[in-house]
Image (spheres, helix red, strand yellow):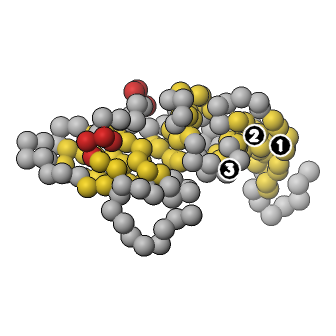
Amino acid sequence: TLNTTPSTILTIPIDQENPITDVNLQLAPSGEMAILEVITEQVSSKHIIPTTRASTYSTISQEQLSLGDFQKYEIYWAENGEYLILESQRDVISYDLKKNTRHLLFRKVDPLDTWDTDIDGYFYIFRHITSTNEDVLEYTLKQYNLDGSEETVVIPSVYFQKNSGYID
């Protein structure tokens, strides 16, 4: 359970040679971890920190989140708190925090596609399907494990009408 009494979880010392210009914190859905981004004039680094106990800055600064070529991606927490979701304009990738591995979940081909995760560790994509009927939007809902495995078609076809006329 989370503590309702505020407590210090991290103290960042002042570095005169490389001063910190900004700090961002992105809390996990459970509230028990967070992504800490420390920005200086020269570099930006991201770290996973616990929020239920105190940590030392010297310890966490040695353990950077190793995103490699994915540093510029938007980062989201998966609802189960065990993965990060990395999103760019081209693709969506999961990052397993325990194994430090990345998995391609899907390549973006349509701006109408949308995705989400759940607390049980599943990734869902609501994918737009090109239809011959211009008055209808058609989608399919697929489910994957957060490592990209075990594709399941949850709903093969969902139809949305674009206008108020009758659907043929």
Q: Quadrant of residue 155?
A: top right
What residue appears at the point 58 percent right and 42 percent down from the top-left corner? 82
Residue identified by numbered label 2: 143
Answer few, some or many: residues within 10 Å of disc 2's Cα (few below 14, many 20 plus, some between 14 and 19).
Answer: many
> What amino acid is at disc 1?
Val
Q: Earlier in the sequence, mark 3 or mark 2?
A: 3
Towards the viewer: 68 or 8: 8
What residue appears at the point 78 percent right and 51 percent down from the top-left corner? 135
Is 156 left or right of 6, judged from the image as shown?
A: right
Q: Earlier in the sequence, mark 3 or mark 1?
A: 3
> What amino acid is at disc 3?
Asp
Residue identified by numbered label 3: 118
How far from the left and from the top, in percent, is residue 161?
79, 56
Q: Secondary structure at mark 1?
A: strand
How far from the left and from the top, in percent, is residue 81?
57, 48
What residue appears at the point 71 percent right and 47 percent down from the top-left corner? 120
Is 87 left or right of 17, judged from the image as shown?
A: right
Q: Secondary structure at mark 3?
A: loop
Disc number for residue 115: none
Residue identified by numbered label 1: 154
Q: Quadrant of residue 5?
A: bottom left
Label 3 to label 1: alpha-carbon separation: 14 Å
State whether residue 48 appears in this view.
yes
